[in-house]
């Protein structure tokens, strides 16, 4: 499998790319922030939204845990005061859990869009038959979607898929068609199998096949590292929009670049180290406001390396930034950086976040024996409250 290698395309000849329509919800530019565990919380979504338009989706939230009032799930399902549209991704392995979570969110007017996770490849999810494993069992998969769509009413519901479990057990075409028939507003496809995890290049040709197979918008996901990749994906596959995951880690300004290219405008220059330091400090402040200083700054640690990728700041500085315990300490460290240092364009496409290569998928016993039926899932399937 390989990513198209054509050179970057020139800007669109029209003034703007078309908006992405999810029911009555219009999204422009046609860009979606992928749900990422431990990343796409209120703080990070707020920072990304300040750079450009699009649809910014929450972390994956367990449907049953949300209904039962789990504190961590409640926090993951929270939104900023000015956040609009409000988008949440739900994880469920039982139709009843999905329906109850959707009913709660919709009846209280908490969301404008709901996404259903059928793409997570994390072993703690697939071993219970959830995430990317679930579309293999077509009756369970369709029941969840049917209940969610019926309960959501006018709130658009979308699904997120992977190609399948592995190359011998592809599910995306059947799953995409079924979802479209059940009334979803769009289907997002990460063009890797669960077995592939995040290692080999995404195979965009599968996105094209799904576009040709369904009559709802298809969103492409996989290897959007810079704005030009989004244009290449749309041109190569005919997808209606793109889903951006690891490409924006440490680079919330990617959404500024994406808005520019979809408007037919040049990509702005990359920020200097001083501008990135300001973003890192702003992110820290948002995390502290959302989670408190202790938890917020511990959460920041995973982001500092991503922000500093492309800048020669030295290991001692990086180590010190990963040990800060107060905002004042962070400000002091950042003040000593060379603010005029330019971004190293040679690492623009260097991977960030998950880099796990192909690995056999952990599944419930006998999961692949049939596409329908089978024994009930264990209690752990519904109790998963976060993705990988």
Image (spheres, grey):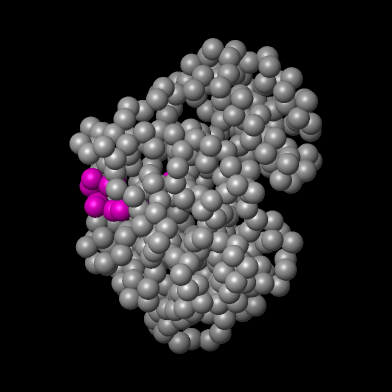
Image point 58% across, 18% down: which residue? 274
Image point 39% across, 37% down: which residue? 259
User: Left or right: 179 with respect to 312?
Assistant: left
Image point 71% across, 20% down: which residue? 333
User: Residue 59's x, y, as percent?
Assistant: 58, 55
Q: Is residue 148 above or below residue 320?
A: below
Magenta region includes residue 378: no
User: Left or right: 38 with respect to 31?
Assistant: right
Q: Nearer the viewer, residue 182 or 154?
A: 154
| Total residue callouts | 0
Q: Is residue 230 above or below residue 321?
A: below
User: Residue 23's x, y, as percent?
Assistant: 39, 64
User: Residue 65's x, y, as percent?
Assistant: 67, 69
Residue 168 appears in the picture as rendered: no
Q: Nearer the viewer, residue 363 or 19?
A: 19
Residue 113 appears in the picture as rendered: yes
User: Left or right: 311 with respect to 54?
Assistant: right
Q: Nearer the viewer, residue 322 or 185?
A: 185
Q: Quadrant of the C terminus?
A: bottom right
User: Residue 145's x, y, as percent?
Assistant: 45, 75
Image point 71% across, 45% down: which residue? 290
Boundaries of the magenta span:
233-244
Q: Residue 382 is drawn in which quadrant?
A: bottom right
Q: Residue 296 is drawn in which quadrant?
A: top right
Q: Is residue 341 above or below residue 150?
A: above
């Amino acid at each position: 499998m390989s990513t198209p290698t054509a050179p970057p395309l020139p800007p669109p000849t029209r003034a703007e790319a078309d908006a992405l329509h999810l029911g009555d919800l219009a999204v422009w530019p046609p860009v979606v922030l992928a749900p990422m565990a431990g990343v796409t919380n209120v703080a990070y979504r707020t920072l990304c939204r300040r750079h450009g338009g699009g649809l910014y989706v929450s972390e994956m939230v367990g449907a049953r845990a949300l209904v039962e009032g789990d504190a961590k799930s409640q926090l993951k399902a929270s939104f900023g005061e000015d956040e609009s549209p409000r988008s949440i991704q739900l994880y469920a392995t039982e139709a009843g859990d999905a329906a109850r979570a959707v009913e709660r969110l919709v009846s209280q007017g908490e969301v404008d869009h709901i996404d259903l996770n059928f793409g997570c490849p994390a072993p703690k999810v697939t071993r219970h038959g959830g995430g990317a494993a679930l579309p293999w069992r077509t009756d369970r998969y369709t029941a969840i979607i049917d209940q969610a769509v019926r309960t959501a009413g006018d709130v658009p519901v979308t699904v997120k898929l992977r190609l399948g479990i592995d190359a011998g057990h592809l599910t995306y075409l059947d799953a995409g068609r079924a979802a479209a028939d059940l009334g979803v507003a769009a289907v997002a496809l990460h063009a890797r199998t669960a077995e592939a995890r995040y290692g080999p290049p995404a195979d965009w040709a599968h996105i094209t096949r799904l576009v040709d197979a369904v009559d709802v918008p298809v969103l492409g996901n996989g290897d959007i590292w810079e704005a030009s990749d989004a244009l290449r994906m749309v041109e190569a596959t005919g997808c209606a929009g793109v889903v951006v995951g690891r490409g924006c880690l440490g680079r919330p300004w990617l959404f500024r670049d994406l808005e520019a290219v979809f408007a037919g405008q040049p990509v702005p220059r990359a920020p200097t180290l001083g501008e990135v330091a300001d973003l890192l400090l702003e992110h820290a402040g948002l995390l502290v406001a959302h989670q408190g200083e202790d938890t917020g700054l511990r959460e920041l640690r995973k982001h500092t390396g991503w922000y500093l990728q492309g800048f020669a700041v030295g290991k001692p500085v990086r180590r010190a930034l990963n040990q800060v315990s107060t905002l004042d300490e962070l400000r002091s460290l950042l003040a000593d950086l060379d603010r005029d240092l330019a971004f190293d364009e040679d690492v623009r496409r260097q991977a960030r976040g998950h880099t796990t290569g192909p690995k056999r998928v952990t599944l419930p016993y006998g999961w692949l024996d049939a596409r329908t039926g089978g024994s009930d899932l264990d209690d752990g399937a519904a109790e998963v409250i976060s993705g990988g």
